[in-house]
Structure formats: structure tokens, C-alpha cells
Image (cartoon, rainbow, N blue to C red):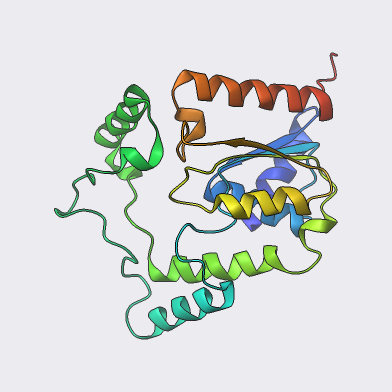
Amino acid sequence: MDDLAGLWRAWKAATPGPHVLAGHSMGGHLVMRALVERRVDPSAAVLTAPMLGMAGPPLPLRVQHWVAKLMTRIGAPTRPAWKWSEKPGEMPSSRQSLLTHDEARYDDELWWREKRPELVMGPGSWGWVERAYASRRVLDAKGAMEAVTVPVLLVSTSNDKLVSHDAVVRAAERLPHGELLAFGKEARHEILREADPVRNRALAAIGDFLDKVAPALSQ
């Protein structure tokens, strides 16, 4: 949050408005957290498949957080919280089915993983999971999202197997100026890397939203 707040102050001071924050998945979570804590003050925010809840068993958040805390204490908190693949360093065979229907855009990621191996990340650690749940509790607190006055567009899909679509829907309802663009089985987690019919619809909605709530000064 300190990194984002520092970047925001420097960028806002050096460039003309309007200033918009966009975040995907965990990045969307961090943008929402910054809005709730009033560390940033954008003209608008766009969140695609934001991690406002993890996909998985519908257990109470406090129980999920307790389990994660326990796992950080009974072993190294840096150990992976889930399995990556059968062979170390090999891409899981089912990974594309979680991210996008578009093979070319998925292959583009594989190209970058090969050319820039220093950027490759593996599974999250139990320490990461525990901190993620702790941060979620900040967002889930009574009145937290309700106090956000910034217009926020949330783009989500009920077919998401990584983050909770239901949590995104609830967030759109809680935000005073929240709007939701929802997809179904035609979209996976990486909505802006999806096949063109999905991607174009999402980009058009984002453009319309920003034209409405944060028009360029030249307009």
C-alpha cells in the first residue's frame, strides 16, 4: 500500500488529470484497499476480476483466515500453499483452462516466461495466503466499501475459478458508485486476454464508463 500511495502521489503531481486507477486480480484487490483506506483519490477506478474473495469452499472468512494463520505456524510460512505441477518448473497442463479461451494470447504469456524467466512466479506461499485473508477482512469490514465515493467499474465472470465472482457482485452492491459488467461461461479469469468477442465487449464498457465518469480534459 505504501508503494502504491507513493507512486500515486508522484504520478498525479507530474501529469494532468483525470487520473484513473486500474487493477486486475490481486492488483484489483490492492486498488480497492487503497480506495477504502483513502490512500489514493482517482477520478475513477476499473477492476477486472478483482480478488475480493478467493474461489473455493464457502467457509466464513474468519475460519479461512484462522486456518491460514495455523498453517504459517506449523511450518515455514514461505512454503507453497498449493501444488504447481507434477514436475518442478513445468507449466500445469490445465492452467489455460483457468485463464483464457484464446490460445494465442495464452501462448504470448508462455513466450514471455521463456524470454524473461526472472519474472516467473510460482504458487503463493502460506504467508501470502494469510496476509491476503487479513487484507480481505479490512475490505469486508462494515462500512468500508460503503464509504468509497469514487466511481468503480468491476468486470467479472461467473466462470472464474480463481477469484470469487459472488464477492465481486457484493462489492458492486456495496459501493455507492459501483457498476458491474458480468460475463458467464464465455469468459475466464483473464478477461482482457480473452477471445475478441469478450475482450472487445469489456474494453468498450470500460471506455464508455470512463467517458462518463472521467472524461478527458480535451473533451
Quadrant where the C terminus is found in the figure:
top right
Quadrant where the N terminus is found in the figure:
bottom right
Query: Across the whole image, how many numbered discs are drawn on residues?
Result: 0
Q: Position of residue 127 (x, y in %)?
A: 43, 71
Quadrant of res 62: bottom right
Placement of 140 over or under 48, stated as above or below: below
Q: Position of residue 46 (x, y in %)?
A: 67, 37
Q: Is residue 175 left or right of residue 207?
A: right
Quadrant of res 34: bottom right
Placement of 148 over or under 186, stated as above or below: below
> Quick one: which residue is furthest to the left in this view?
87
Q: Position of residue 169 (x, y in %)?
A: 66, 49
Viewer-nearest residue: 151 or 15: 151
> Quick one: which residue is furthest to the front in this view?
185
Residue drawn at x 68%, y 62% is 139
Residue drawn at x 58%, y 47% is 50
Residue drawn at x 81%, y 36% is 43
Q: Position of residue 74 (x, y in %)?
A: 35, 85
Residue drawn at x 39%, y 79% is 71
